Amino acid sequence: MSTLTTLIIVLAILMAIVGGETGIRSFFSVLINTILLILVAMLISWGINIPILILIFIPLKLVTIIYLGTHDYTVAKNSFYSSFLVCLIVSVIILAFQWMAQAAGLGPEAGEVLVGLSQMPGLSYPLIAVAVAIFSALGAIAEAAVAMSSGLLEIKKHNPEISRKNLMVSGNAIGNDVLGTSMNTILFGMFGSFLSLFLWYFRLHYSLGEVLNEKLFVNEALIILYSLIGVILTVPLSTFFLSRGMSDHNEVKNESRKSNTN
């Protein structure tokens, strides 16, 4: 049994113990999303139109992440709407800034690895960079939306008669905490994945200008910024959609109770 297989089994057991049914569904959500990413890579390598793949797989991944990670349909539905809207906005930002950055393709660091191989595979490197940035930011956006939905759902459970205004105030307070933790997670994730590259820059005495113009660094830094922008946009939009959706759901229940009483 390989190390990877062992860790996957340990992860599944822990998620089942800690999260119960929701943990098991979340584990399958991770597996399905991994399969979707592999499928996207395969379809791109086969020459399928990248913008069409992006439009198809963004809602698929959001549905997998949100609906399998949330047990309340109203919360999941409004989380999906807010995440999808944020993804569309961030996608426009990514298209604009990827075009201005002109950082797509392979950097000089990949030269030794690709010796003897063609660096012109017949695919659009700028579109691939856009796809990578969108799917990277999508994870942070969906995570923030699910965190917001879970917090607001617990508030609604403990105080079913809470007003929409108070729910939005509570959502903003939750959003501040989600925003802080998400930013730290994204930044430390970047530093951890790029630690060896940073050491290489230092040992080879790269100047600040060379680092800031390095393709690998620029692409990673842009993905971090896209993710942060997505999380920032997700917090207020999720609060608005979720508070409105749960308040409307509560109003419908009250009206049905009144009609039944009459």
Image (spheres, rainbow, N blue to C red):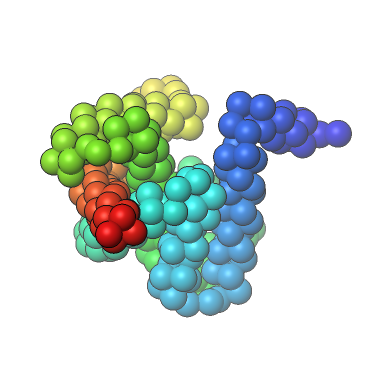
Name the quadrant of the N terminus: top right
Residue at left 49%, top 53%? 67
Q: Residue at x 21, y 32 (%)?
A: 170
Instruction: Judge whether 247 appears above or below 44 on screen.
Output: above
State which quarter of the image contains the C terminus: bottom left
Residue beneath the point at 38% across and 64% down: 126
* View extreme (right): residue: 1
Q: Is residue 203 above or below residue 20?
A: above
Name the image quarter holding residue 182.
top left
Closer to the camera in the image, 29 or 93:
29
Tell me residue 147's x, y (percent): 38, 37
| Between 153 and 48, the one nearer to me in the picture | 153
Q: Which residue is more in the foreground, 91 or 129?
A: 91
Q: Position of residue 101 (x, y in %)?
A: 25, 54
Left or right side of 33 for 187 = left
Give the tally of numbered discs: 0
Residue 8 position within the rendered picture, expressed as x and y whole percent measured from the top left = 71, 35
Query: Closer to the camera, 22 or 175?
Result: 22
In the rendered image, which quarter is residue 236 located in? Answer: top left
The residue that appears at 64% across and 47% down in the rendered structure is 28
- Observer able to see residue 12: yes
In which image quadrant can residue 228 be found? Answer: top left
Outermost residue on the left side: it is 165
Residue 76 relative to residue 36: left or right:
left
Q: Position of residue 99 (x, y in %)?
A: 26, 62
